[in-house]
Image (spheres, helix red, strand yellow):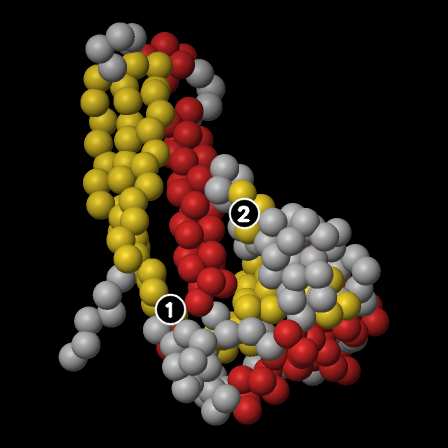
Amino acid sequence: MEKLGYTNHTDRVAFKVDDIEERQAHLNWEALATSSGAYALKKQYDYNVLTNINSNASTDTTNLGAASSAISCNTGNECANYLSTAARLLDEADVPEDNRWCVAPPQFYEILRQADAKLMDASVTGESTSALMNGAITARKVHGFTLYQSNAIAVGSTGSDSTATFGPSSTSGETNVLFGHMSAVATASQIAKTEVVRDPNSFADIVRGLHVFGRKVLRPSGSGFIGVYSAVPDLNT
């Protein structure tokens, strides 16, 4: 059985819990700091994994756009049609219809939820209590894709390591959108260690944790089975 050959990475989080604050405050500062640290690790994890997928994905500049040559997605209908085009490209690559996914920034889904896309219309969704009617990303698939949202994908910017964001260019409105099949990418993640140590310089405990993870694109461009695409729509032409 072939090894996946992950590229390993680590991230760390640490914070102090002051004795007085811990005992006297009406809030659980340790729980709040832990939650904040976990969110920071999540964003770095998203950024690392998604940039790797984006760098190794196939492109179709004619149908899915490219930096400075993006496909217009300014209406709900255009965003819905964009997903339909991506589904067709995966169909043509003989990608299985199940386990397909799409990752996009919040602005993409904001436009997709607009009324002209009819995704909030019960006659289209076939259900009277669709999650879309409450403004959430639907639990149901759209054009065969399970939809995911990430703030690691920038809009109108190339992004940066310091902000844990990436994008195709600084052109206003352009953004990356990733489409693919579950078998095309793989990740492994673990909080390897957490510990509490006494701060020698103050009356406080230091809480720290180590996040270890790996990621790899298994079916990149040129692999025959095109399992993942990187696309560039324009959300503000």
* Image point (48%, 42%), residue name: 161
- Label 1 sits on what residue type? Val
Q: Residue 149, how many percent across, how many down?
A: 57, 58
Residue 80 lies in quadrant: bottom right
Label tally = 2
Q: Which residue is mark 1?
A: 217
Q: Residue 226, how many percent across, how many down?
A: 46, 82
* Image point (49%, 63%), residue name: 54
Cα gap from disc 1 to disc 2, whole angstroms: 19 Å
Residue 44 lies in quadrant: top left
Label disc, if present, on residue 165 of the rendered structure: 2
**Is residue 195 toward the left or the right of residue 39 in the image?**
left
Crowd band around label 2 with a 10 angstrom C-alpha radius: few (<14), some (14–19), many (20+): many
Q: Residue 139, how many percent across, how many down?
A: 57, 69
- Label 2 sits on what residue type? Thr
* Image point (75%, 67%), residue name: 73
